[in-house]
Image (cartoon, grey):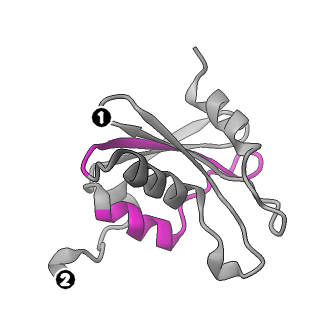
Amino acid sequence: MASYFEKLQALQAHAHAPYSHFQVAAILVLKDGTEVRGVNVENASFGGTICAERSAFVSAVSQTGKVDQFAAIHLLAGKGEQFVMPCGMCRQVMSEFVGSDFPVYLYNTQGASRTVTMGELLPFAFSQADL
């Protein structure tokens, strides 16, 4: 059975990044073990670009209809030893569906991993309670 790092490496090839050449892969794991994959998809109209994290969450919602069944996300991006964190927009979108203890597993291109939580990534998330 392939590790998440191996799955992410293979998935990275599906990213559409003709402008930045920065391929990102995400695997969103549901509580029942289902894995939903996402990659970044760039667009010449940069506002139309979608990140891998949002791609995975949107796919999970549209494929399963479940918005409260997310267990963890695994991400691979960057070059070398650096760990690339989700952008601000992805952090906000993810926070809509998960709690502050939701684990985000980051992998660098050399296979090392680091775990952070949504609470660490976005300690003061804007939520429905703020509306």
Question: Which of the two discs, 1 and 2, labels the residue nearer the N terminus?
Answer: 1
- Which residue sits furthest bottom? 131
Give the image quarter of residue 13.
Answer: top right
Q: From what the image shows, is residue 91 above or below residue 81?
A: below
Say few, some or many: other residues with alpha carbon within 10 Å of mark 2 (under 14 / 14 to 19 / 20 or more): few
Q: Nearer the viewer, residue 79 or 59?
A: 59
Magenta highlight on residue 10:
no
- The relative height of residue 118 versus residue 105 in the rendered view (above or below) is below
Residue at 27 percent of width and 56 percent of height? 100
CA separation, marks 1 and 2?
Answer: 27 Å
Callout 1 amino acid: Lys
In this view, 24 is above or below 37: below
Please state the extent of the stretch shown in magenta in the rendering. 68-96
Give the x, y percent position of residue 82.
68, 51
Image location of residue 36, percent across then percent down: 48, 41
Query: Magenta stretch: residue 76 in it?
Result: yes
Q: Most extreme residue toward the top, as rendered?
A: 1
Could you tell me which secondary element the residue under label 1 belongs to?
loop
Pinpoint residue 65: horizontal percent, then vertical percent.
31, 50
Which of the numbered marks, if any, corresponds to residue 17? Answer: none
Relative placement, left or right, of 107 versus 65 is: right
Which quarter shows the N terminus?
top right
Amino acid marked by disc 2: Asp
Q: Secondary structure at mark 2?
A: helix
Instruction: Tell me: 8 left or right of 58.
Output: right
Mark 1 Cα within 10 Å, few/some/many (few <14, many 20+)?
few
Find disc 1 in the rendering and name its residue.
31
Residue at image position (56%, 37%) is: 113
Comparing labels 1 and 2, the label whose residue is closer to the camera: 1
For disc 2, the marked residue is 130
Residue lying at 62% horizontally and 51% vertically, measured from the top left: 83
Q: Residue at x 58, y 56 (%)?
A: 52
